[in-house]
């Protein structure tokens, strides 16, 4: 059984992606017999190119993918280069890490509530600073260039890239390398960039590509903060996919392939830039360019990092405030009173989406955790790990734009008659939960000191007994943390829920995004706070359980 | 005690054991460790000392290629899975299971044949033997280094192994403690007529062990 686990996991990661892409390739070229498409044709691509605003949509998607990843990575790299090991680094790191679990939609709403013309920033500065007594007539969010959308993406990409960077750092021998560089007279930042970054970047390349893929095909953040006429490509595709006119599905399929192409192009452009930067870096290194005076760079990196954390934190604060706000007229900095009326009114409406969110997340996480444990245990017993190729498979569902294969998968599930049910929804979430659970648990599991297992075997304990009585109990905290990551990923899923749930299974996330257009800040605040709170509850449980279980075991008690 | 062998067969015998990593041969030796005696294998780090113990215990990583016979108690070990080889391991770290109490560690190690109340009684008697009576409920993380080393030794002894493999077991202890632990370990092995294979890079370990010394 255990030996089959890696194959089952690989099948779960590759199968839906491959089937989903096939499911859009055929209709894109005109073949979809149920809708009368029996001949292969390029007509749908021709129609796609004729769609008004398509070029702008494509450019927005490309820009969102490349610009946000570049800015977020630059901030993270300069921050780690300039500050790793300092007290300020520890403070900002502990502020930013929890923000990773804030769902994209909640963070985007928070940003919108802060920077909108009638948002908190303007209210806090009006009228004493701005002189405004009515919201200015500016298009700050949903701006046609997508700047607000990109800002929303950057603040969410920073915690993710910081996490993967810090996870890779110990394997790069960073401390010694940068000490050597500093001893040659290099400034802290320059020395780090020349000595450590090349090694580090190799380790974080796949997560960086995953960020590009995500940002170039994002839907929920784009619906909340992004431009509308025309929207980024992925948002346009969702509209076509949900069009009452079923013939639009041919167009949507051709569009899904275009989205796949856009994301591949974004990653390809990034790859070329990588090569360029590497060459530039080598020339600088050989040239001995030392750049000792890096204080402005360091200060800028720390400020950008602090700003990113502040945006999400204050965004959550203003969401919470709106959810309990009584009358709150512009330009008052605070509401005239607090009331739970909004919550009471929407409690009934919240119950069903909340139940679906929790159960879907729970089921997908449990399945992902069992599969991950089985794979890792098999690896521990055979002494063989999947290596780089297995890592690429893990990243596959994160590198292929969701919209490029979920639509095809939806059509496939529809044909099989299992769309729109809980099982299908859990399956769709599992595709994205599984890689994150695996990636979170693999490192601590592989770092386990196997001499414990050898000693236990010397006592006559079978491999099963070693797993249940030694390895798993010692890795409870790591397993629960991985589960909490998986649950957070599930809670944040928008597109899989929308497409595979076929609109019949609303979650807190789909409901919150659907409310965006309505603009009722009290309801949005309530839904977004619930959405953001769920992952926190998951992480809290992941800390509390080992703390209680091992309250008398110092070595295994998490530091609370 | 196991009745499956005559006393003269209770030795640990290695015959033409070779271990290679890629094309480099790390280990190539034959030796017999008589019951109640300690044979010391010495060599610098990277010479394959620990690899030899991993081969005997059944944990050789797949990257290594190994051949040769290991016989214990008259049984060929290399064909057996690790948990049926009955070789007790001691490392330089005590490696007490951090999720179990001190008593739990000892009870975990007891053979399955010991049942019911007898398990607890045996574990408590073992603790008393190393002057740690009353420490049964303690968290292993709260013990001193010397206490941990003693519990680790007692834990492997109560598991009734047919041989002991020691991987630099004294190297992390300070000088006083090192002498005491050496005496304790070697005396216990003599008393129980266990063949002991010790790998170390410390010549005083080998001298204290008093048995044959093999250089890698």
Image: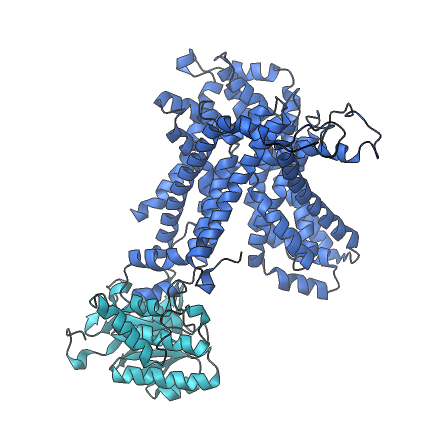
Chain colours: A blue, B cyan
Residue A24, percent across and down? 47, 23
Instruction: Give the side of residue B154 with respect to residue B9, left or right.
Output: right
- The number of callouts visible is 0
Residue drawn at 55 percent across, 58 percent down: A171
Residue drawn at 64 percent across, 27 percent down: A521
Instruction: Give the side of residue A83 with respect to residue A344, left or right.
Output: right
Q: Quadrant of residue A50?
A: top right
Q: Say if A8 sits above or below A288 in the image.
A: above
Residue B166, percent across and down? 36, 76
Instruction: Give the side of residue A228 with respect to residue A264, left or right.
Output: right
Residue drawn at 20 percent across, 71 percent down: B75
Q: Say if B136 sits above or below A204 in the image.
A: below
Query: Is residue A232 visible from the viewing direction of this image?
Result: yes
Q: Say if B203 sits above or below A382 in the image.
A: below
Considering depth in this image, is B124 or A404 the residue closer to the camera? B124
Instruction: Give the side of residue B88 with respect to residue A172, left or right.
Output: left
Residue A146, percent across and down? 68, 29
Q: Quadrant of residue B203?
A: bottom left
Query: Is residue A383 visible from the viewing direction of this image?
Result: no
Q: Quadrant of residue A409?
A: top left
Residue A218, percent across and down? 58, 31
Considering depth in this image, is B180 or A218 the residue closer to the camera? B180
Q: Say if A283 sits above or below A489 in the image.
A: below
């Amino acid at each position: 059984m255990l030996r089959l686990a890696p194959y089952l996991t690989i099948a779960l990661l590759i199968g839906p992606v491959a089937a989903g892409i096939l499911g859009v390739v055929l209709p894109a070229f005109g073949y979809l017999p149920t809708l009368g498409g029996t001949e292969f044709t390029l007509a749908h691509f021709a129609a796609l190119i004729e769609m008004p605003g398509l070029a702008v949509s494509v450019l927005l998607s490309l820009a969102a993918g490349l610009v946000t990843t570049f800015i977020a990575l630059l901030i993270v790299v300069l921050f780690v280069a300039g500050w790793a090991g300092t007290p300020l680094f520890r403070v900002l790191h502990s502020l930013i890490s929890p923000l990773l679990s804030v769902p994209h939609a909640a963070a985007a709403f928070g940003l919108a509530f802060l920077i909108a013309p009638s948002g908190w920033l303007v209210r806090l500065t009006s009228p004493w600073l701005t002189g405004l007594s009515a919201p200015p007539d500016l298009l700050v969010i949903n701006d046609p260039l997508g700047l607000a959308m990109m800002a929303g993406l950057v603040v969410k990409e920073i915690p993710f890239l910081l996490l993967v960077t810090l996870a890779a750092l110990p394997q790069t021998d960073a401390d010694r390398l940068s000490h050597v560089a500093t001893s040659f007279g290099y400034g802290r930042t320059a020395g780090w960039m020349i000595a450590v970054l090349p090694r580090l970047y190799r380790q974080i390349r796949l997560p960086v590509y995953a960020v590009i893929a995500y940002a170039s095909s994002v839907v929920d953040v784009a619906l909340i903060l992004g431009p509308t006429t025309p929207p980024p490509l992925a948002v346009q595709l969702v509209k076509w996919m949900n069009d009452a006119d079923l013939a639009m599905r041919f167009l949507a399929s051709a569009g899904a392939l275009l989205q796949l192409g856009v994301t591949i192009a974004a990653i390809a452009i990034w790859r070329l830039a990588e090569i360029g930067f590497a060459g530039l870096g080598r020339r600088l290194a050989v040239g001995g360019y030392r750049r000792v005076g890096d204080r402005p760079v360091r200060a800028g990196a720390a400020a950008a990092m602090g700003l990113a954390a502040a945006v999400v934190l204050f965004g959550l604060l203003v969401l919470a405030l709106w959810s309990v706000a009584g009358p709150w007229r512009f330009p008052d900095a605070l509401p005239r009173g607090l009331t739970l009326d909004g919550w009471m009114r929407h409690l009934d409406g919240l119950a069903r989406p909340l139940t679906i969110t929790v159960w879907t997340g729970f089921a997908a996480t449990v399945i992902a955790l069992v599969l991950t444990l089985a794979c890792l245990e098999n690896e521990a017993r055979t002494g063989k790990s999947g290596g780089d190729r297995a890592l690429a498979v893990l990243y596959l569902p994160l590198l292929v734009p969701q919209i490029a294969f979920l639509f095809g998968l939806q059509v496939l599930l529809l044909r099989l008659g299992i769309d729109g049910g809980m099982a299908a929804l859990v399956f769709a979430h599992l595709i994205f939960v599984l890689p994150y659970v695996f990636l979170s648990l693999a490192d601590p599991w592989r770092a386990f000191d196997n001499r414990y297992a050898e000693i236990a075997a010397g006592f006559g304990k079978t491999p099963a007994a070693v797993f249940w009585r030694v390895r798993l109990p010692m890795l409870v905290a790591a397993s629960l943390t991985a589960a909490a990551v998986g649950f957070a990923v599930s809670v944040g899923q928008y597109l899989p829920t929308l497409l595979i749930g076929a609109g019949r299974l609303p979650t807190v996330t789909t409901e919150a995004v659907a409310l965006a257009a309505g603009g009722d800040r009290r309801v949005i605040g309530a839904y977004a706070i619930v959405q953001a709170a769920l992952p926190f509850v998951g992480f809290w449980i992941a800390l509390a359980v080992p703390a209680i279980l091992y309250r008398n075991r110092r070595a295994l008690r998490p530091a609370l | 005690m196991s009745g499956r062998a005559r006393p003269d067969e209770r030795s640990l015998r290695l015959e033409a054991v070779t271990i290679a990593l890629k094309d480099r041969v790390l280990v190539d030796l034959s030796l017999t460790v008589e019951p109640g005696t300690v044979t010391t294998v010495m060599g610098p780090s990277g010479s394959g000392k620990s690899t030899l113990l991993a081969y005997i215990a059944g944990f050789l990583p797949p990257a290594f290629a190994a051949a040769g016979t290991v016989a214990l108690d008259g049984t060929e070990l290399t064909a057996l899975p690790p948990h049926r080889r009955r070789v007790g391991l001691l490392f330089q770290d005590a490696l007490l299971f951090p999720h179990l109490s001190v008593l739990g560690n000892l009870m975990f190690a007891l053979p399955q044949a010991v049942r019911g109340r007898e398990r607890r009684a045996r574990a408590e008697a073992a603790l008393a033997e190393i002057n740690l009576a009353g420490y049964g409920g303690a968290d292993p993380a709260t013990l001193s280094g010397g206490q941990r080393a003693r519990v680790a030794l007692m834990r492997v002894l109560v598991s009734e192994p047919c041989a002991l493999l020691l991987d630099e077991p004294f190297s992390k202890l300070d000088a006083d403690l090192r002498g005491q632990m050496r005496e304790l370990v070697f005396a216990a092995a003599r008393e129980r007529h266990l063949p002991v294979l010790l790998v170390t890079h410390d010549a005083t370990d080998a001298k204290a062990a008093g048995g044959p010394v093999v250089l890698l």
